Image: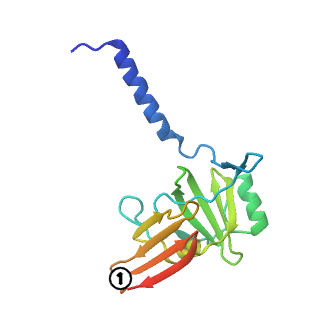
């Protein structure tokens, strides 16, 4: 079979361009642009997959309690946060966000503060929400759904069920605040 050179070149270029997007994970933190000045606005990152399963994650534990001080190499941004808040109480296992970034998240339980870092750069600092607290206490759910019933409103439904649990538990969060907790 005889191939024409231009077809082969086009096929090769298409394959290279298709694969180029796969390597863009975690390059530069992304920001949304807002306001009249069109300046970057920080936003909280959410995990692409919140559920525990055999494909995305095997462990139910989302955060682990920090037992030793965080040691270098820490970025300048991370050192600045530690200088302001002290050592974090909990550290979340690195996760891939919906914006295709690898995110590190730290929690200060008594201060009700959480921070997120992408490539060591602080991209979010804000209050510890009910959803964060639930994830620290109970870990990843077996099933998770995200709904957007009204534009600008986030609703998450998590289901905890397992071999060792006597009851099935379903929790619902609206904009990261607990709105229902049912056991059946």
Give the vertical position of 75 relative to 113 (above or below). above
At x 63%, y 65%, the residue is 106
The quadrant where residue 56 appears: bottom left
Q: Residue 30: give x, y in percent of width and height.
A: 63, 47
In the image, farthest residue toward the left = 1
Q: Residue 34: give x, y in percent of width and height.
A: 70, 50
In front of the other: 47 or 60: 47
The kind of secondary structure element at disc 1 is: loop
Give the vertical position of 30 relative to 52 (above or below). above
Q: Residue 176: give x, y in percent of width and height.
A: 58, 70
Q: Is residue 170 visible?
A: yes
The quadrant where residue 9 appears: top left
- Graded by Cα atoms within 10 Å as few (under 14), some (14 to 19) or many (20 or more), the crowding at tag 1 reads few
- Quick check: 15 left or right of 131? left
Disc 1 target residue = 164
Give the vertical position of 19 relative to 80 (above or below). above
At x 74%, y 51%, the residue is 35
Question: How many numbered marks have been drawn onto this rendered protein structure?
Answer: 1
Quarter occupied by the C terminus: bottom left
- Quick check: 129 left or right of 137? right
In front of the other: 77 or 99: 99
Q: Is residue 73 visible?
A: no
């Amino acid at each position: 079979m005889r191939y024409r050179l231009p077809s082969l070149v086009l096929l090769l270029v298409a394959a290279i361009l298709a694969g180029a997007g796969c390597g863009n994970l975690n390059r530069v933190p992304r920001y949304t642009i807002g306001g009249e000045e069109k300046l970057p606005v920080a936003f909280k990152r959410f995990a692409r997959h919140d559920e525990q399963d055999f494909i995305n994650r095997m462990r139910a534990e989302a955060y682990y309690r920090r037992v030793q001080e965080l040691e270098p190499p820490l970025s300048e941004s991370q050192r600045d946060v530690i200088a302001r808040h002290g050592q974090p109480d909990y550290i979340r296992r690195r996760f891939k966000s919906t914006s295709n970034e690898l995110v590190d998240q730290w929690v200060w339980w008594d201060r009700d503060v959480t921070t997120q870092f992408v490539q060591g750069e602080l991209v979010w600092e804000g209050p510890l929400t009910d959803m964060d607290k639930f994830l620290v206490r109970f870990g990843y759910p077996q099933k998770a759904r995200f709904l957007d019933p009204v534009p600008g409103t986030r609703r998450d439904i998590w289901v905890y069920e397992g071999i060792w649990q006597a009851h099935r538990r379903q929790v619902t969060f609206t904009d990261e605040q607990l709105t229902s907790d049912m056991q059946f």
